Amino acid sequence: MVTFNNVTFDQMMYLFSQPLTGTDPRQIIEYLVNPLLTTIFYTMLILTSCYVVLFYRISLKRRESKKRLDPSFVILFFLSVISVGGSVVLSVNEIGYEDIKAYYFEDSKLYNQYYIKPEESTYVFPEKKRNLIYIFLESLESSYTSKELGGVKDENLIPNLTNMALDKGVHFSNGEYLGGMLPIPGASHTASAMVAQTAGIPLKTASGVNLHVNNYGKDGETFLPGAYSLGEILETEGYNQVLFFGSDAAFAGRDKYFQQHGNYEIRDYNWAKEKKLIPEDYKVWWGYEDAKMFEFAKETLRELGSQSEPFNFTLLTADTHFEDGYLDESTPNIFDDQYSNVIHNSDQQILSFIEWIETQSFYEDTTIVVVGDHLTMDKDFMRDTPESYQRTIYNLFLNTGYPTGIETNRLFSAVDMLPTTLSAMGVELSNNRLGLGVDLFSEEDSMIESLGYDAFYTELMKRSTFYERNFMKGTDLKQILNNQAK
């Protein structure tokens, strides 16, 4: 994986199965220009050379070619077999044999044993229901902080997020300093992380024979129909819900997931054009930049805050997406590389946005969750990270009613965010578990703490008949049949 480093096997499979609607074209161009064209060039060069050597001998006298089988054919044939076989072995080694074996051939019983159905749980909301502002930060790792604070950088790229985690809110860490949630299969890119954090289960749209679902999110009628999410819980309680993107919400089927699991109103890149907030032909990065998005989001929050019903406002940033991020005109040039400057600027934007929220009349009754979606996939930014260092995903809970500070040495993942978010809103759960997650404010162990990280990770890599029957409910197979019929 030369161009897109830090990509797990399950992530590759999910990305291959999704539409590219809304994708920044520069990333596709980079893929085409760098590895693909290089591969095609060398492949054609080798094939042409082999063709000439094996089947033709040039006659210098007649200046014509005669087709004849050369004795070297056998040698070159076996060299080709060895070359192809070696490539397969190297590819499997790079991706991971255990990951491939688990993905294709093993059936997990994890869900049968541990899954708690959110739709059958009991929720006791406070008399005055709290609003929720849930901010997904693209590729935001706790690793971006300085080494002395738990990160891997010489200088702290996220000073404001670090300070808020240390002093202002509640931050769950896997260590003694700044840390966060551990990466797991099925929560390793934006759409799957959103599902895992809000439904308590990873997103695995394809496994085994179902790997070739090319348009599950785009063309499928339903998205993960058996899941029951935070949005559905809050919808039942009368919340107004808005999903706010500066990109196209249709990418990877995100619009379908949030509409079908909570009836969210979608306010994305296309909505901004319809409302003439940006010109019809305006397109930078994934749609429009975060600086504009935060300003537009303020007006939506004023609107929601003026209504009598509680609200759930979910927002996703994009400037810090790989490769190298989006360099806004106002981005200070502090560090030697673009991505560091983009991350640092995003950190300041988040602080300014939160400080604005704190001045609003609705803030007293509002809980804010700030969380990364997944580890960065930037190809070289984390190249110097020591192998022994565990990269983690940032999290912060503000205005919760719980004592502020770092909750140290908690081993957890994206699936734990569902019950923890409800608890942060003052909601009492019939037990401390929902989906595969546990309320981190409780004393109960998470799945990772109970089973161990490696064991939990391996189970999530496996196929699950329970998952396919109860969550997917054949929607991936239906899409395969539809594609084959075209």
Image (cartoon, rainbow, N blue to C red):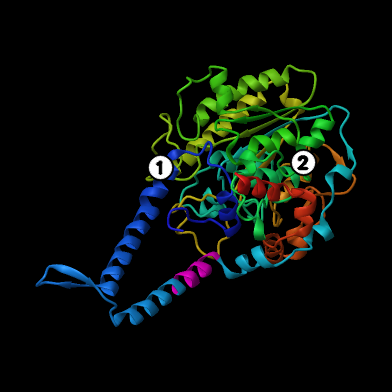
Q: Which residue: 46% across, 48% down? A: 155
- In-front residue for pair 190/328: 190
Per the image, is 110 magenta? no
Picture quadrant of residue 265: top right
Q: Which residues are magenta?
A: 86-95
- Indicate which disc residue 413 carries: none
Residue type, numbered disc 1: Gln
- In-front residue for pair 116/178: 116
Which SS class for mark 2? loop
**Whether label 1 touches label 2, CB < 8 Å:** no
Mark sitting earlier along the chain (1/2): 2
Q: Which residue is mark 2?
A: 229
Q: Position of residue 11 (x, y in %)?
A: 58, 54
- Indicate which disc residue 338 carries: 1
Tell me: 45 left or right of 410.
left
Q: Which residue: 29% across, 74% down? A: 54
386 in relation to 21, above or below: below
- In-front residue for pair 374/390: 374
Picture quadrant of residue 308: top right
Q: Position of residue 229 (x, y in %)?
A: 77, 41
Q: CA distance from mark 1 to mark 2?
A: 37 Å
